[in-house]
């Protein structure tokens, strides 16, 4: 049975970082404290249309979640495994 949070998230009119934060009952200031940044920085992050996956991953982790990346095609759904932040990047 899905949790109440899952049901609320599925029924949300749109999903956004600010909406998710509010759904979890956190203020921008509280999230900023978890991230070690300022409240205006959180406001800026929440309004960005484009950000690095690492930034998004840290934001979601500070909310208590884990980022999953899924690609949907008409006939299949594929999960992209993101490298761990501590994994060294291969040389180019």
Image: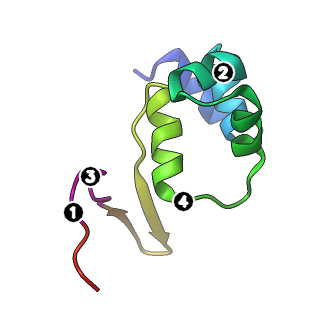
Quarter containing the C terminus = bottom left
Residue 16 visible, this angle: yes
What kind of element bears circle 3? loop
Which tag is nearer the camera, tag 3 or tag 2? 3
How far apart in space, not on screen, are marks 3 and 1 (Cα)? 9 Å
**Picture residue at 65% right of the left edge, 26% below the top:** 21
Quarter containing the N terminus = top left
**Picture residue at 43% right of the left edge, 75% below the top:** 75
Task: Tell me, yes or no, whether the two marked residues, 2 and 1, touch with CB atoms within 8 Å.
Answer: no
- Is 22 drawn above or below residue 19 in the view shown? above
**Picture residue at 21% right of the left edge, 62% below the top:** 88
The answer to which of marks 3 and 2 sits earlier in the sequence is 2
Magenta segment:
81-88
Answer few, some or many: residues within 10 Å of disc 4's Cα (few below 14, many 20 plus, some between 14 and 19). Answer: few
How far apart in space, not on screen, are marks 2 and 4 (Cα)? 23 Å
The answer to which of marks 4 and 1 sits earlier in the sequence is 4
What kind of element bears circle 1? loop
- 30 horizontally vs 69: left or right: right
- Is 46 drawn above or below residue 30 in the view shown? below
Residue bearing mark 1: 88
Residue 86 located within the stretch drawn in magenta: yes
Residue bearing mark 2: 23
Q: Is the image coloured rainbow, by chain, by secondary structure, or in one colour?
A: rainbow
Residue bearing mark 3: 84
Which tag is nearer the camera, tag 3 or tag 1? 1
What kind of element bears circle 4? loop
- Is 25 drawn above or below residue 60 in the view shown? above
């Amino acid at each position: 049975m899905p949790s109440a949070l899952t049901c609320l998230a599925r029924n949300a009119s749109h999903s956004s970082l600010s909406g998710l934060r509010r759904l979890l009952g956190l203020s921008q200031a509280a999230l900023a404290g978890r991230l070690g940044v300022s409240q205006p920085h959180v406001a800026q992050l929440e309004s960005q249309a484009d950000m690095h996956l690492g930034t998004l991953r840290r934001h979601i982790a500070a909310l208590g979640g884990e980022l999953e990346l899924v690609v949907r095609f008409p006939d299949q759904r594929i999960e992209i495994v993101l490298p761990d932040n501590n994994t060294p990047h291969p040389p180019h």
